Amino acid sequence: MLTVNHLSVIGKQNRIVKDISLDIHKGEWFALVGQSGSGKSMTAMAIGQLLAPNLQAKGEIWYQEKNLLTLSSSEMRKIRGKHLAYIFQDYQGSFTPFLTIGQHFEEYQRTHLKLSKKARRQQAVEALISVGLYEDIYRRYPFQLSGGQLQRVSISIALLLKPDILIADEPTTALDSVSSFKVLQLLSRLQVETGCAILFITHDLRHVKKYAKRIAVMKEGVIIETGDKNQVLNHPQHAYTDKLIQSSPSLRSRSPLTLEGVSG
Ligand SMILES: Nc1ncnc2c1ncn2[C@@H]1O[C@H](COP(=O)(O)OP(=O)(O)OP(=O)(O)O)[C@@H](O)[C@H]1O
């Protein structure tokens, strides 16, 4: 589905992502994990040619026999949305405060589809309902929605054109645990319904354990370990992966505070 070959992201002073390679298979949930600053988001942004202008991507990113890194910005715009979509941790930043949710749908639909106004509205309302929201949301402004509702709207817009790949960059980090649970359940259901692959970027190994099929672990711009989720989580080959697992409350094999350690 998508093959990243020897990708590097280079800044003026340093190399942020260093010669990484990975494959995302059709319809799979692929998790990219690692500490803050390890280069996960830069990898995600490089795939869609969304890097800041001071950064440069080198290497190859193959999708449908095209190296995405060689496409012009107008060719890439056609790929984004229709084939490759994003949702971000900062869902608020994806919305323009003075546009209604309906107007956000309109903008997206006008860019990618040729539909009548009535058909656009109907498609948007169906998309809102498919993520558990209701028709009334169409007329509302972003500030009138909760964080969980807004993230659901971003998911419904991202999946509107049934992309092959959804890149979800820490989509639940800014949500409370109940909203976070609902958003992940929703993503999991929609993934099955639409058959899209998900590149899921997260710090949270509990989510990886529950949803991912394969996993890659990043450290300081390098992929240090990759493979089947159970293999990596149960038999980590790298000390750093083991450390990540031990620091995840529900995954570590032993509690840091054992009963033997408590006197009295
Ligand atoms: N425009 C930029 N110019 C130079 N360096 C940048 C730029 N954007 C990000 N970086 C640096 O690139 C490194 C990797 O950042 P990135 O956002 O990919 O990390 P991450 O693994 O996604 O972290 P987090 O989990 O905190 O989001 C960081 O050190 C960051 O400061």
Image (tube, rainbow, N blue to C red):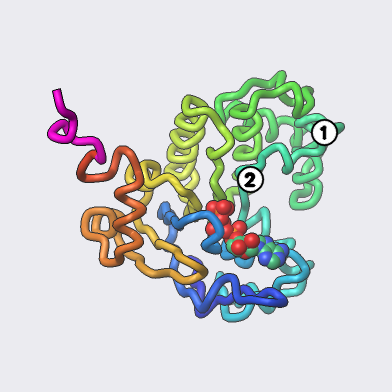
Residue at image point 70% right, 33% down: 124
Q: Earlier in the sequence, mark 2 or mark 1?
A: 1
Q: Is residue 95 magenta?
A: no
Residue at image point 74% right, 64% down: 52
Q: How many marks?
A: 2
The three-letter code of the residue at mark 2 reads Ala
Can the viewer see residue 92?
yes
Q: Main secondary structure of the magenta part?
A: loop
Disc number for residue 197: none
Calculate the distance from the C-alpha at mark 2 to the C-alpha at mark 1: 18 Å
Residue 208 x/y as whole percent: 38, 47
Q: Is residue 62 left or right of residue 262?
A: right
Residue 190 x/y as whole percent: 49, 40
Q: Secondary structure at mark 1?
A: loop
Residue at image point 41% right, 55% down: 28
Q: Residue 76 is drawn in which quadrant? A: bottom right
As displayed, is residue 100 above or below residue 41? above
Q: Nearer the viewer, residue 215 or 27?
A: 215
As displayed, is residue 219 above or below residue 250? below
Disc number for residue 158: 2
As displayed, is residue 92 above or below residue 233? above
Residue of label 1 = 97
| Residue lying farthest to the front in this orientation | 264
Residue at image point 24% right, 59% down: 231
Q: Nearer the viewer, residue 90 or 48?
A: 90
> Residues in magenta?
256-264
Determine if the C-beta at disc 1 is less than 8 A from ligand 1.
Answer: no
